[in-house]
Every structure is written in C-alpha cells, then in structure tokens.
C-alpha cells in the first residue's frame, strides 16, 4: 500500500506482503473475542499477538515513502494521487461488499445485517459510518493522516523536531491511555491532554515513525540487535499480558493486544529495522524473484479490500467440520483465505501492469 519514486527498496515490499497476510491472520483469529476459554482461544490470542503489527506497518510504510513528497511533486499533486487512490479503493470495496451482501445475503456470514435496507441512502449511510465492512477503518484513518501530511512533511529535514513529535506522540497516544487503562491515571486526569492535535493520534505517530527509522536510524549491528529483541519480546509480552488479563474474564479486553498498545509500537519498529537489514540480499536477488516480490506487494491492496467477504463466504458455506477445523487452526484458515484472495489479486495486478505497458508503448509509437 505504499509507493515511491526513489530507488526501489525491496524490504518495503516484503513488509507490505507480510502486513497483508497479517491482516488476514488477525481477522481469521476472531475467536479470541468470544467468551469461551480453551485451546482455540489460546491459539487465537497467540495469532493476534504475532500479527498485530499489520496496520501499524502499513502506516509506517506510507510515512517512509510520503514524508518527502515535496521533493517529487506539489501538494496539489500529492492530494490528487493519494486521495484518489485511497478514496477509489474505499468506494470500490464498499460498493462490491454492499452489492454482494445485499444480493446474496445467505451466502455471506453476517450479511443479513447489511442487507436489511438495500438502497442508495442506506449505502451512503453505511459508507459514512463504516458499517459495510468495518475493517476499512484503515482507509478512513490514512485519509486523515494524508490531510495533515503537508504539515508533517515540514519536519522531514528536521530530525530534532521529528524526535520531539515522536516522543510526545508516544507519551500521549500510547503511554497515557495505557496508564488510564491500568487505573494508574484517572480518566478525568488524562482528559485534558487527549485533545491535543496530532500528538494523540497513533496513526500520525506510526506515519512519522516509519519515515524516521528509514531516514535517520542507520542499519548498524547495534540497531539490528535492539530490533531483534523488540521483535521477539514485544509480541511475547503482549501475549502474556493479554492472557493474564483475559483468561478469567467472560468478556475479552483487547487493549493489551492492540495496535494502540505501546508494545505494538516497539514490535512494529523492531520488525521494520530487522527486515530492512535484509535489503542487500533482496537487491542481489534475480530479476524474476524481484519482479515476483513487487507483484505480490502490488496485489496487497486488493487482498486487503476483499479478504473479509471471502472469510464471510467461508463462514456461511463450509461444512461444520471444516468450520471447526478453522477454529482449531486459525493460521490454516488465514493461509486458505490469503491464497483464495491473493491469486485473483495477483492476476489483476499483472493484467493492470501489462495494460499500462501496452498503453505506454502505443503512446510512444505515435
């Protein structure tokens, strides 16, 4: 979900593909939100902790590529490119899901709730309220970040300012809510700082973090060591806290295993730096291997858009035995869904690329 006019960095494509699969894995482990506790719940909790980096990484990749947009094109062009891309994706995905759910309500799990009122007014209401496919919340969040990106980009060449924004953002967007959740700080005491612009946005924090890590944090042995520790320790600690909080609760508390938890930020930062260390090896791959990686990366947007309808279709159409198997092995379900959505997504990405190539060749021949 990121693009760049710079020399291509293939570690970003790897992170894009990993994050795309992570999104699918998260949505295939929703058993964790149920009231039951047991082996299935334990596996789902592990899967949530391991793949919680998904949306933070998408935000970080956007920041890594777009904070310096002023060096490539105007702010007007930035809005045209980004809002058009994300806005069209959101609209196409919403229309597709709405029509599928309303025309075939018995073919998708949960579609009856959407199909109760099949009308343009209901569609607009669902689009504005993000109730057609609520996993599209990412698009609304990133559109909000794009709206303030011209302001954020002024800090691109000011590392001290960036560090200040990141420190303030981590404190107000992560630490204060966590202390409030842990009943260390009273909600009324924290409310005064929760309205501070930009600093209380986790999306803005991740956007800035991705750029700061790429631009100002060198790939050294010390950084790699810290990244490896963060990448391993963070999900382990999130799982431990999530288990301790929820194992005896009838209702699941998702806060400690969430993209808005401090450990999710350290996890995403560690993973970003760890995968970045692979860049020399990725650059040394053959042309076909690099091309395959780029194709997979370019298909990630379509997988994100349409994986939920596929999950819901499976939920309404697989046998009880297969459904039970998915519950027992949520990672297995994630692989199945990823392949089912990924194959046509890759085919579409290849066809789109071929069409663009033919268009350029035709234009050059005139």
Image (spheres, helix red, strand yellow):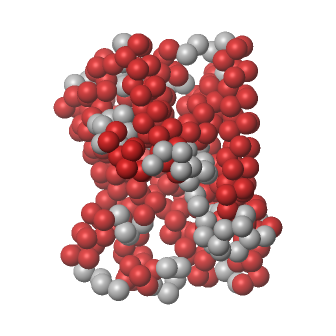
- Which of these two is toward me, 262 or 18? 262
Residue at (33, 19) in percent of width and height: 155
Viewport quadrant of the C terminus: top left
Q: Is residue 15 visible?
A: no
| Residue 43: image location, x then y, percent | 76, 61
Q: Is residue 67 visible?
A: yes
| Residue 4: image location, x then y, percent | 42, 28
- Which of these two is toward me, 12 or 327? 327
Residue at (30, 84) in percent of width and height: 117
Could you tell me how many numbered marks the image carries? 0
The quadrant where residue 365 appears: top left
| Residue 254: image location, x then y, percent | 58, 58
- Which of these two is toward me, 32 or 293? 32
Residue at (69, 23) in percent of width and height: 226
**Farthest residue in the right direction?**
39
- The image shows residue 206, relative to residue 101, as above or below, that is above
- Which of these two is toward me, 263 or 306? 263
Residue at (51, 38) in percent of width and height: 175
**In the drawing, does residue 9 fall left or right of residue 225?**
left
| Residue 32: image location, x then y, percent | 65, 65
């Amino acid at each position: 979900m990121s693009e760049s006019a710079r020399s291509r960095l293939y570690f970003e494509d790897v992170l894009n593909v990993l994050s795309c699969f992570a999104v699918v894995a998260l949505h295939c482990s929703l058993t964790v939100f149920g009231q039951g506790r047991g082996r299935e719940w334990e596996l789902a909790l592990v899967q949530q902790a391991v793949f919680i980096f998904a949306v933070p990484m998408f935000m970080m990749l956007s920041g890594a590529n777009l904070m310096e947009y002023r060096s490539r094109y105007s702010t007007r062009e930035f809005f045209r490119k980004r809002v058009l891309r994300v806005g069209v994706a959101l609209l196409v995905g919403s229309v597709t899901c709405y029509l599928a759910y309303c025309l075939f309500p018995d073919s998708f799990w949960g579609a009856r709730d959407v199909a109760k009122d099949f009308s343009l007014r209901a569609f607009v209401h669902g689009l504005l309220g993000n109730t057609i496919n609520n996993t599209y919340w990412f698009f609304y969040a990133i559109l909000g970040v794009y709206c303030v990106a011209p302001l954020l980009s002024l800090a691109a060449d000011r590392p001290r300012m960036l560090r200040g924004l990141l420190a303030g953002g981590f404190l107000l967007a992560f630490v204060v809510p966590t202390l409030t959740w842990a009943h260390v700080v009273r909600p009324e005491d924290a409310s005064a700082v929760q309205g501070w612009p930009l600093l209380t946005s986790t999306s803005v924090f991740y956007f800035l973090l991705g750029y700061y890590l790429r631009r100002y944090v060198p790939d050294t042995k010390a950084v790699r060591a810290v990244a490896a520790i963060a990448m391993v320790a963070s999900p382990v600690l999130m799982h431990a806290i999530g288990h301790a909080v929820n194992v005896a609760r009838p209702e699941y508390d998702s806060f400690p295993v969430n993209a808005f938890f401090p450990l999710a930020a350290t996890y995403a930062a560690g993973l970003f730096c760890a995968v970045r260390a692979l860049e020399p090896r990725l650059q040394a791959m053959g042309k076909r291997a690099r091309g395959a990686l780029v194709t997979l990366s370019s298909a990630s947007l379509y997988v994100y858009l349409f994986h939920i309808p596929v999950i819901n279709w499976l939920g309404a159409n697989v046998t009880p035995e297969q459904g039970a198997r998915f519950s027992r092995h949520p990672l297995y379900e994630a692989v199945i869904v990823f392949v089912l959505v990924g194959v046509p997504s890759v085919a579409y990405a290849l066809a789109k690329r071929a069409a663009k190539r033919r268009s350029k060749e035709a234009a050059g021949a005139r």
